[in-house]
């Protein structure tokens, strides 16, 4: 049996801590959105609006209705002159005056996500739907992805994004499809890569499996695994800055996803970040605590804090070493802060997850390539490529 390991690659962190400050938003937000200088935050506490970057908030109660009081808002989206708010069990509401008044579009719809391309608005409701009149009316735009015939075995769509002049959609099997005619016809570009899609720029988009994040820069034909061990809840882009929120905080990339840096600053380490927004020179992060630690709330950090030089994580820490002694895989120089070691197949499937241990039997593994990810508090600190031949 032969086992080979490539050099481990360290994550990066900022050379100075970002200055996170909690805003006065009094709830745990499920969604955050910026539109024309205004900041919107929604959740079980209803929909709130801030005109001063989160210092003060007013509850948007006019016209907006739901089964609860205030109505729970699960999703916000900015498109052209409109702001859209998805209310639990009541579908989408629309504002034409930046949140002062709300009306319900003519056709009720309750989407998983929104995207837009040119003058069209797209959403996923199990199928991909398209609107040419800012959500008043909708037509199905995925006829050759999910046929609606009785007993069809085809999976439903999960997300849709616009990248450049193309539209991409994914289904529950992780298959990805591309349309160049606003959803009239689709071509499958990949069999199974990820259910959740995120547009990064005009040439790049990400697909997440929950355990791995993949990147494509060639219209979904080829994919590269750029991140393991981080399950993103939300992604937002500011020029070359890609912010990703998930379990235990936020990470940032400035090189299109090749490397990532923790930007928690010791403040958001224990928070699950589910909502991100950029507004008036700040990045906003909202979410909840995984334990009973009170309200996590909505936090902000100046973008100017996030342009420092990159330094290595814990530069005094020795690089972990993976070796084989007899029938055991041994881990050396693993810092006590590492709380999880995960083995992934090249398909992205996690096959083994252990806590910080000194050794592991190779009998638990079949022949093949593996990626070993060393994680601390949900953030991958370093990785190693392994090949086992029996």
Image (cartoon, helix red, strand yellow):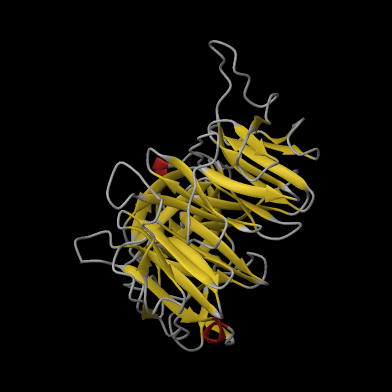
Q: Residue at x 80, y 38 (%)?
A: 181
Q: Among all residues in the image, which is located at the extreme top? A: 150
Evaluate whether residue 381 shows in this view: no
Q: Is 200 left, or right, of 250 in this rendering?
A: right
Q: Where is residue 49 in the image (x, y as percent from the top left)?
A: 42, 67
| Picture coordinates of residue 208, whole percent (x, y) | 55, 49
- Is 26 drawn above or below residue 304 in the view shown? above
Tell me what residue is drawn at x 49 percent, y 43 percent. Answer: 104
Residue 92 horizontal/vertical position (percent): 49, 44
Q: Above or below — where is 343 with respect to 302?
A: above
Q: Which of 83 and 304 is in front in this view?
A: 83
Residue 228 is left or right of residue 360, and the answer is: right
- In this view of the protein, can residue 128 be seen by the observer? yes
On the image, the x and y values in percent for residue 309 come to 59, 87
**Is 328 on the left-hand or right-hand side of 45?**
right
Q: In this view, does 186 lie above or below 372?
A: above
What residue sits 27% from the left and 59% below the top? 290
Could you say which is closer to the camera, residue 100 or residue 344?
100
Q: In which quarter of the image is residue 62?
A: bottom left
Q: Work out whether residue 39 or residue 233 is closer to the camera in this orientation and state it.
A: 39
Task: State which quadrant residue 215 falls in.
Answer: bottom right
Closer to us: 266 or 52 = 52
User: How many numbered circles are shown?
Assistant: 0
């Amino acid at each position: 049996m032969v086992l080979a390991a490539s050099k481990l690659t360290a994550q990066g962190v900022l050379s100075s801590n970002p200055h996170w400050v909690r805003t006065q938003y009094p709830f745990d937000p499920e969604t955050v959105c910026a539109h024309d200088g205004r900041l919107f935050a929604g959740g079980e506490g209803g929909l709130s609006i801030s005109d001063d970057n989160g210092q003060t908030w007013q509850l948007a109660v006019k016209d907006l209705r739901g089964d609860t009081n205030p109505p729970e808002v699960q999703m916000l989206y900015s498109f052209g002159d409109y702001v859209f708010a998805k209310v639990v069990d009541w579908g989408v509401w629309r504002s034409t005056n930046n949140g002062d008044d709300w009306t319900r579009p003519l056709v009720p719809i309750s989407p998983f996500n929104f995207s837009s391309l040119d003058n069209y608005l797209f959403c996923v409701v199990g199928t991909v739907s398209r609107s040419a009149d800012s959500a008043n009316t909708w037509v199905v735009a995925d006829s050759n992805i999910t046929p609606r015939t009785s007993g069809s075995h085809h999976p439903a769509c999960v997300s849709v994004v616009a990248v450049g002049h193309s539209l991409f959609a994914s289904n529950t099997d992780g298959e990805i499809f591309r349309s160049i005619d606003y959803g009239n016809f689709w071509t499958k570009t990949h069999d199974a890569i990820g259910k959740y899609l995120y547009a990064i720029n005009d040439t790049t988009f990400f697909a997440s499996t929950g355990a791995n994040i993949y990147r494509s820069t060639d219209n979904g034909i080829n994919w590269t695994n750029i991140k393991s061990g981080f399950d993103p809840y939300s992604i937002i882009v500011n020029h070359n800055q890609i912010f990703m929120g998930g379990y235990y905080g936020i990470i940032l990339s400035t090189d299109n996803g090749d490397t990532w840096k923790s930007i928690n600053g010791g403040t958001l380490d224990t928070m699950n970040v589910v909502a991100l927004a950029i507004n008036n020179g700040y990045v906003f992060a909202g979410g909840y605590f995984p334990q009973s630690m009170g309200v996590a709330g909505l936090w902000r950090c100046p973008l100017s804090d996030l342009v420092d030089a990159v330094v290595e994580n814990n530069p005094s820490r020795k690089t972990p070493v993976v070796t084989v002694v007899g029938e055991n895989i041994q881990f050396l120089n693993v810092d006590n802060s590492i709380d999880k070691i995960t083995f992934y197949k090249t398909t992205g499937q996690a096959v083994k997850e252990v806590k910080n241990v000194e050794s592991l039997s190779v009998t638990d593994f079949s022949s093949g390539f593996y990626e070993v990810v060393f994680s601390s508090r949900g953030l991958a600190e370093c990785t190693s490529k392994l090949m086992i031949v029996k």
